[in-house]
Image: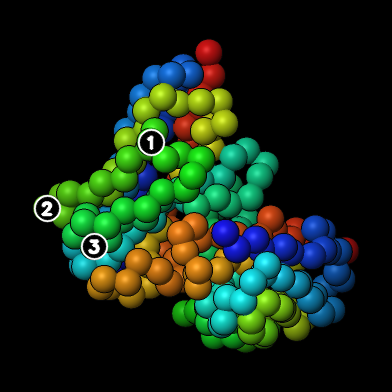
Amino acid sequence: QVQLLESGGGVVQPGRSLRLSCAASGFSFNTYPMHWVRQAPGKGLEWVAVISYDGSNKYYADSVKGRLTISRDNSKNTLYLQMNSLRAEDTAVYYCARVSFPGDWLSGRFDYWGQGTLVTVSS
Amino acid sequence: EVVMTQSPATLSVSPGERATLSCRASQSVSSNLAWYQQKPGQAPRLLIYGASSRATDIPARFSGSGSGTEFTLTISSLQSEDSAVYYCQQYNNWPPWTFGQGTKVEIK
């Protein structure tokens, strides 16, 4: 069965860095685009970034552009989110999510989500 | 950016009654609209995609309708386990992929 397991969250000071991981299993990870979505405490869902199946295409939300970087290692079935210059407003649960269809198209419904990892940016 | 607006913010419905949730897009998203259910402490779960297709293992009491800019999620006979926050999301015009602010469904 499809499983997505995030890790790497924690408490970090403003301006510092953190790297999140999302370990995938149960499907051909190297054929699917993947997204990161976050949710601030008590708030709604906010899309963060997407990466194509081969890592050649990436898009970011304006709120994170230049600070957060999405990447993947298909040999390890793992998605990453490198978070630099963190701000208080980056405090959120970060989810990785799979697009429903494999291939080049980055969009579609998000059919599987991980359980999330909490990032708290605080001094 | 396509802005998704959901209404109402909170809906209180008695068990067995019908719940109707609305989602409006600031521009046409065709039928590229999904609905997700999120319970406290859990990840979102896909309910509806393509505006009206139920995802795998979703009960028949959940149905979606609409196209263009106006969409509806209906829970035909509310069960206690349906208490959750429901989000709509458009995946037609991207980036960014955008979500509504959510509708909280409470059991009266």
Which residue type does callout 1 highlight?
Answer: Gly
User: Foreground: B81 or A47?
Assistant: A47
Asked whether the beta carbons under mark 3 and mark 1 sit within 8 Å of each other, the answer is no
Left or right of A66? Residue B60 is right
The quarter of the image holding the N terminus of chain A is bottom left
Is residue B16 visible to us here?
A: no
Labels 2, 1: front one:
1
Residue A31 in the image: x percent, y percent?
A: 21, 68
Q: Label 1 is found on which chain of the structure? A: A
Task: Please report the residue visible at 76 percent of the width from the left and 72 percent of the height from the top.
Answer: B21
In this rendering, position of residue B101 left or right of residue B47 = right
Q: Residue at x 55, y 50 (%)?
A: A46
Residue farthest along the left direction in this orientation:
A75
Q: Chain of mark 3?
A: A
Counting residues from the N terminus, which is met first, the one under dot 3 or under dot 1? 3
Residue type at tag 3: Tyr
Under circle 2, the secondary element is loop
